[in-house]
Amino acid sequence: MGRWLKENLVLVSGILLPALLVVGFFILNKMPRMLADPPAYDFLVVAYQYNYQNPSDYYLSFEVRDGKLSGRVSPKAEVNRYINRHYATIFLYRTKDHAIEEFAFDLPEGLDDLDESVSLNLGKAGELNLDKRKQSPDGYQFEYLGYRGRGGLLGDIFGMGSRYENSYVLKKGNTSIDLVDLSIDLNHYQNDLQFMGWVVNEDLKP
């Protein structure tokens, strides 16, 4: 066996070294995620949509005030005619299960004749306690990466491939956790998500 190894040292090295490199890179790529505590806070996001074939005379807007989500529907005017947000989906992202829960809300009647802003009744979404700061209490941030082409085959193996589908991540230091494919699940443009806040207890509201 020893003689065979000596005679085929180049062949053995050519097989073992690439395999060891693959294992090493894999461990280095996964180690930060394995050592980091998983995210503990769910978060609320609004996904906007626009139908160019059926434009509307109003637009929707949402913000967090005093730790609560509020929404308004406003008439289109010359000053805001480029705000194309007349459909919206409010959803909760559950970080433990990586699952999405949608919150329904009703638009008021008479939107075709709207002449002033009207508050929206957001139901359960409006009851959540939110921390709208970019960083969660446990140090994670919701980020949009956009397209990043890199890595090729090795990138796919090590989790560094092109980011068409998983453009949103939770990031903490060197740890980056891919979220479910929000663009497909919600049928919206990938960069038209608006982060609203982390779901927290009453005592943690900013």
Image (cartoon, rainbow, N blue to C red):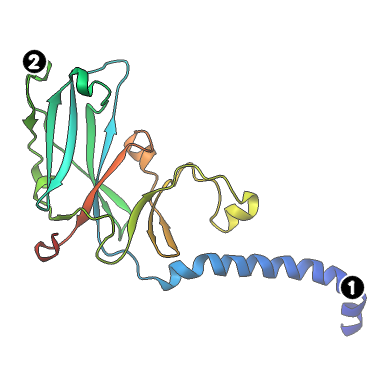
The quarter of the rendered structure image containing the N terminus is bottom right
Residue 138 sits in quarter: bottom left
Is 89 situated above or below 64?
A: above
Front one among 143 and 11: 143
Is 144 situated above or below 129?
A: above
Relative horizontal placement of residue 134, taking residue 147 as reference (left or right): left
Front one among 124 and 46: 46
Is 138 situated above or below 160?
A: below
Report the residue at 13% width, 26% height from top. 74
| Residue extending furthest toward the front | 79
Residue 28 sits in quarter: bottom right
Total residue callouts: 2
User: What number is the disc on residue 201?
Assistant: none
Relative horizontal placement of residue 97, taking residue 103 as reference (left or right): right
Q: Tags 1 and 2 in contact by the CB under 8 Å rule?
A: no
Front one among 139 and 99: 139
Front one among 50 and 66: 66
Report the residue at 87% width, 70% height from top. 10
Which residue does the numbered mark 2 point to in the structure image? 113
Report the residue at 11% width, 32% height from top. 106
Spatial separation of the CA atoms under disc 1 and disc 2: 83 Å
Q: Position of residue 8 (x, y in %)?
A: 89, 73
Which residue does the numbered mark 1 point to in the structure image? 8
Give the crowd class for mark 1: few <14, some 14-19, many >=20 residues within 10 Å. few
Secondary structure beneath dot 1 equals loop
Secondary structure beneath dot 2 equals helix
Q: Amino acid at mark 1?
A: Asn
Relative horizontal placement of residue 145, taking residue 69 as reference (left or right): right
The quarter of the rendered structure image containing the C terminus is bottom left
Q: Position of residue 6 (x, y in %)?
A: 90, 79
Report the residue at 63% width, 49% height from top. 152
Q: Amino acid at mark 2?
A: Asp
